[in-house]
Image (tube, grey):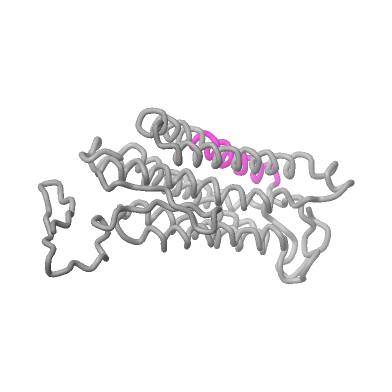
Amino acid sequence: MNSTVGFWGEPSSTDWCEQNYEVTYYIAEFFNTISSLCLVFMGTFGSIMHSDGFDYRFSLCFRTITLIGFGSILFHGTLIFPSEHFDGIPMVFFLLILFYSINENKKEKKFGKWFPITLFLWGFIFSVILVLLKGYYENEIMKLVEFYIFQGSFFLMSICVYLHIAAIVIRNLRKEKSIISLMILGTIIFLIGYLGWNIDYHFCTEMSKILNPQLHAWWHVAASYSSYSLLLIVMFDRSKMLEKNPKIKWVCIILPYVGLSEQYLPSKVISESQELLIDENYHIYLVK
């Protein structure tokens, strides 16, 4: 909500319900900016906890979550229209990488090289269109057109990815109680956060008359946790397909991660009494 003008000048991007420059002269939306650190944290935490024994695609997903967090900090901290793309474009590529991981989760590749190339080109073309529209950022109608094009596309992509993950859980992981719990938890947290996002965007005037609970900031918290949780489900399924005996483990009760048997961790030191066996599918086993 545009109330005062601070260090970054008059807002030219999507302006959320939080009062601008209310806390400090140098940060446009203080709470929305600080809450974006949740994305940075979850992406970094995921990268550290899953550094060994997993496909590079998942490392790329975690790094993209971190990038989304930094982009969100830049966006909400300045409210300059071009900075909005540093938040939105990484979100698109996160979904595309996740979509690739969902569909290529078997031991043998289902599609050829054309599949990841097509997904990358789709994301690249979509990003170029968004960047080209920045020339019209002073036009309020064009800003709304771009906003709803992005939000509509992102919503449809998110639904598609979620339904694929739900199908994986029902088909492959329905007997895994920890995965069912994680799926339910991630879904509930996402829906609560998304409800808050919509209330913040569509009912800002009414809400501000009473008390602004900073629902968009809470959306960052919900989105970071739910996206991380759903990514873990995809990782678990992939690891189970590769017979790596995955388990859902927890840090401080609230932070889940996928743990593998020690024999599948490449960083594990091999003793002199063990031999390294590599089968025809390049799976690594330790034999005593």
Question: Is 74 located above or below residue 153 in the figure?
Answer: below
Question: Nearest the camera: 82 or 214?
Answer: 214
Decide whether the magenta segment is chiefly helix, strand or loop: helix
Q: Residue at 59% of width from left, 62% of height from top? A: 37
Question: Is 35 located above or below residue 229 in the figure?
Answer: below
Could you tell me residue 205's position as x and y percent? 84, 44
137 sits left or right of 123 in the view:
right
Q: Quadrant of residue 71?
A: bottom right
Q: Residue at 23% of width from left, 39% of height from top? A: 109
Q: Quadrant of residue 23?
A: bottom right
- The residue range painted magenta reads 140-157
Question: Nearest the camera: 243 or 90?
Answer: 243
Residue 151 magenta: yes
Q: Residue at 62% of width from left, 43% of height from top? A: 147
Question: Nearest the camera: 79 or 32?
Answer: 32
Could you tell me residue 217's position as x and y percent? 68, 53
Residue 162 magenta: no
Could you tell me residue 130's position as x and y percent? 53, 48
